[in-house]
Amino acid sequence: LAAAIAARPPAELARLPAAERALVAEYAAAEAEARAQPLHAARSSLIESGVLLYLHTAGGGAAWGLFESVRQRLDRAALVQNVARTSLVTCFVPILLVGGVVTAYNKWNKATDTVEEKFRLYFALALALYPSGRLLQWVETFAPLWLGGHIVGFASFFTWTLYTESDLMRSDRELEQARGAARQAA
């Protein structure tokens, strides 16, 4: 975004206060530096879109299904079934519940203003809990190892974000302090 703003005609940029122009230039330089890194576009889009989280949860599900099948000395068919089902469920549960349900709730909650509208929304959501409990029973029957795989996948994702020092694991205050320290060093 900063690179796009910096590319605006100089007359437009001149209307900004000097501090904001300096900030735009700083952010544009940081964006250019980041774009120069190998595989930047693929890496940043994977992290920002959440695909990396879903890949980690699917991998965690597969690993947990494999581990439990080997631990229980199951035959090959059961092993493959546990790996595939656990992997699928641990990938799609976050996509549907976190991505779908939370997004829909936020949209509906923002669209309600009055106490009556909020009451209707929350009442409908409370009624939806009963069928969702039935859905989770079906998920549990289909892939009984899904919760363990989900935990392994999330642990893998958060370990990866810590290892790569991703901004996802840093607070806004830490990001501002790092930016301030970089400014002072320059």
Image: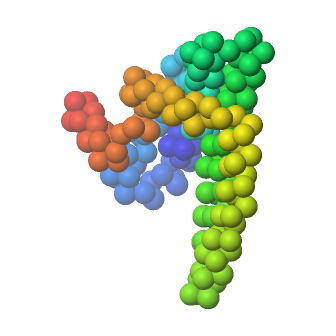
**Residue at x 29%, y 42% (from the top left corner):** 174
**Residue at x 49%, y 26% (from the top left corner):** 156
The picture quadrant where one finds residue 116 is bottom right
* In-image side of 98 versus 13 (left or right): right
The picture quadrant where one finds residue 139 is top right
**Residue at x 37%, y 57% (from the top left corner):** 17
Q: Position of residue 146 (x, y in %)?
A: 62, 35
* In-image side of 26 versus 95 (left or right): left
Image quadrant where one finds the C terminus = top left
Residue 1 or residue 79, whichever sits in front: 79
The picture quadrant where one finds residue 52 is top right
Height in image: 121 above or below 76? below
Residue 23 or residue 113, whichever sits in front: 113
Q: Position of residue 115 (x, y in %)?
A: 56, 87
**Residue at x 43%, y 26% (from the top left corner):** 159
Image quadrant where one finds the N terminus = top right
Height in image: 96 above or below 31? below
